[in-house]
Image: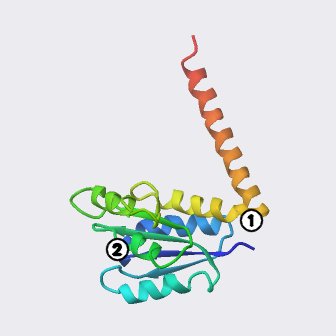
Amino acid sequence: MSKKVAVIMGSDSDLPVVEGAVKTLKEYGIPCEVHVFSAHRTPQEAREFSEKARENGFGVIIAAAGKAAHLAGAIAASTTLPVIGIPIKSSTLDGLDALLSTVQMPGGIPVATVAIDGAKNAAILAAEMLSIEDAELAAKLEAVRTDNRRSVLEKDAAVSARFAD
């Protein structure tokens, strides 16, 4: 069985986006825990969670935050587990502020960053990371890729047929 994935959001207002990651992780059979920790309002709790994450059975941490979006970086600073940041579109800057805050990390403290509101891809990336040592999970990922390919080719055939001379 795969290690757990932690899904942490900076505010419960991020939950509508974050639910996409949780749903995707469950579809792959990956156990996860979901928490609200703020890099600015609960920095001690976020740090303590991160420091103990590996010994508590986690393999990857997903961190979602909007606006200043410092959460993923704060989490990454306190663990050597992979951290995936989800910038949340939650301000007048349409998420660009969150994207830049998440992706602009100093050398030595990496954060993998997905698209603004890219919760599903964050979960898939976490699954891919865990699949390095989990053949069953790797097979599930491969099956989904095969299904996606088949679906696109079916749509291609339908569209091509519609416009054929």
Secondary structure beneath label 2 = helix
* Within-10-Å neighbours for mark 2: few <14, some 14–19, many 20+: some
Name which residue lies at 38% across and 71% down.
14
Please tell me how crowded label 1 is: few (under 14), some (14-19), or many (20+) other residues with Cα within 10 Å. Answer: few
Left or right position of 66 against 136: left
Residue under circle 1?
133
Query: Residue at position x 50%, y 81% from top?
Result: 50
Q: Earlier in the sequence, mark 1 or mark 2?
A: 2
Label drawn at residue 59: none
| C-alpha gap between disc 1 and disc 2 | 34 Å
Residue 99 to residue 58: above or below: above
Along the line of sight, the residue nearer the viewer: 156 or 63: 63
Quadrant in which residue 68 is drawn: bottom left
Q: Which residue is mark 2?
A: 13
- Label 1 sits on what residue type? Glu
> Which residue occupies 76% across, 56% down?
139
Residue at x 42% of width, y 89% of height: 45
**Residue 134 at what x, y percent from top left?**
75, 65
| Residue that extends furthest to the right in the rendered view of this protein | 135
